[in-house]
Image (tube, rainbow, N blue to C red):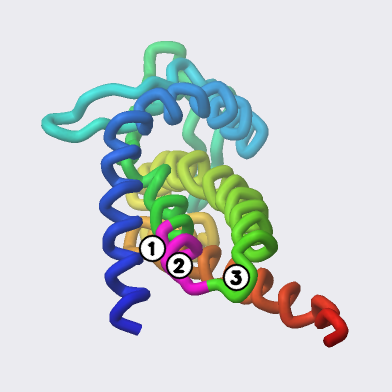
Amino acid sequence: MSKVILRFALALAALLVLSQVYATRFTETLLPVFRWEITQLDDNYRVLDLTLSRQGADSVVRLEVGLAQAIVIGGRALLPDPQARANVSTLAGSITQPAILALALIVAWPTRRAGIEYPVRIVIACTCIAVVILADVPFVLWGELWDIHVSALEPNRFSPLLLWKNFLQGGGRFVLGLGVGVLAVVVGQGLVAREPRPNP
């Protein structure tokens, strides 16, 4: 187990270095996808801008929207105002967190047949991480927008969106990243176990 932990730590360090080099380019590539997804999630908002910017020492994905139509919350209506803007953001580094953890785990965990297990692990991890990314940043930004209205007009309102946002921001990304890594390892091992053994 100590060897696994050491390999995990080394893989994590290497992936963090790569993330520092390529994370900005990767995030910029995803921005049009995020913008499209947000417009599909909620037509109450007009997406005015979605950019990668600096906030102090941090790089953040910043979303600026206006109301496209009236929203009714807590029995009160918010009417569109052409001059009104709402700005929310989330840390850009959060995009790569699950991927880094998942990839570090699948690289560190021992294999019985590397030629079969590693490709399976990578395919499963990349597929699941793509889903996680699409369920992360756009939903967090959407949740931050919704939280502005809910906090002001109906603070006790139950919202699955806000629960999901709080889960992700409260450590859920680490849980998802490790979960994807474990899933990839287990499925890879399962395929090897089903492989017919060669006749002696």
Is 194 displayed left or right of 38 in the figure? right
Percent coordinates x, y for residue 116 in the rendering: 69, 62
What residue did someone put label 2 on? Answer: 178
**Residue placed under numbered mark 3 in the picture:** 183
Residue in the foreground of this view, choosing between 55 and 153: 55
Instruction: Tell me the number on the disc at residue 174.
Output: 1
Q: Amino acid at mark 2?
A: Leu
> What residue is rendered at 40% in x and 45% in y?
96
Range of the magenta residues? 104-110
Q: Is residue 167 visible?
A: no
Measure how far apart labels 3 and 2 are at the Cα level. 9 Å
Mark 2 residue element: helix
Name the residue at the bottom extreme. 200
Q: Quadrant of the N terminus?
A: bottom left
Up the image or down, 90 lies above or below 187; here it is above
Instruction: Decide: few, some or many residues near mark 2? Use Cα within 10 Å; few <14, some 14-19, many ≥20.
Output: many
How many other residues sit within 10 Å of disc 1, few (<14), some (14-19) or many (≥20)?
Answer: some
Q: Give the numbered dot on residue 83.
A: none
| Residue at 65%, 60% in the rendered image | 115
Q: To which quarter of the image does residue 43 belong? A: top right
Give the residue furthest to the front: 200
Q: CB under 8 Å between callouts 2 and 1? A: yes
Q: With 106 as the anchor, is 25 left or right in this view?
A: left
Q: Quadrant of residue 38?
A: top right
In this rendering, position of residue 123 left or right of residue 13: right
* Residue type, label 1: Phe
Please tell me whether mark 3 or mark 1 is closer to you in this view: 3
The question of residue 106 being in magenta is answered with: yes
How many C-alpha atoms fall within 10 Å of the one at disc 3: few (<14), some, or many (≥20)?
Answer: some
